[in-house]
Image (cartoon, helix red, strand yellow):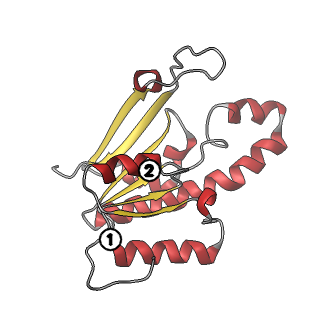
Amino acid sequence: GLQHRDSSPPDGVAQLCGGAGDTAALLIRRGYQGGPNFDIVVGFDLLNNEVQDNFLKYLKYRKPKILLISTPCTGMKGFSALNRAINHTARLKSRRVSVPLGKLAGIVALAQMKAGRDFLAEHPQGSDLWKLPPWQIIARQPKLVRVPIHQCMLGLRGPRSGLPIKKPTEIWARHPSW
């Protein structure tokens, strides 16, 4: 559960917007103690203040070693620029979800850093996420590592064509040994 348990060790890994939770499964197979996945697809609506408060309490009491962050990028990159010009209403609707979750993600990533714990966040390269105030503070932290990748290197392929898709992505993480 999410309640405070004094006698049990901290969770090894938790997720913020982790979808089906596949990434954490890799870490759990490597010996990390699994924690929850806070995502709408598993019943956590983080746009709800009470759910956000419970998430923050979870972080405070369960102290996950690693927080994996993959907030929605729909209103932050890609078609967002196109929608700015041709479908303003759709863009605003997307940003009503992606911006608050992006800010929450920045706040908790910064809290993880300040507590000496780790986070790993991924978003498209050049995403507006990295421009949000909490992420700008994180950008100045000496323990931050930024890694640009192209998802074709990880096997991403087009659903119809089967061809590799470049999809430039940035990963930001707190490096524990710096």
Position of 78 relative to 68 (above/below)? above
Percent x, y for residue 53? Answer: 54, 77
| Label 2 with label 1: CB-CB less than 8 Å | no
Q: In the rendering, at what x and y percent does residue 122 appear? A: 45, 42
- Which sits in the foreground, 87 or 120? 120
Amino acid, disc 1: Lys
Q: Nearer the viewer, mark 2 or mark 1?
A: 1
Task: Give the residue displayed 38% in from the left and 53% down from the top.
Answer: 138
Circle number at residue 136: 2
Circle 2: is it few (<14), some (14-19), or many (20+) Cα within 10 Å? few
Which disc is residue 63 wearing?
1
Residue at (79% x, 31% y) in the render: 85
Q: CA distance from mark 2 to mark 1?
A: 24 Å
Furthest residue in direction front, as rendered:
29
Secondary structure type for disc 1: loop
Left or right: 162 as drawn, with respect to 108: right
Q: Is residue 16 left or right of residue 50?
A: left
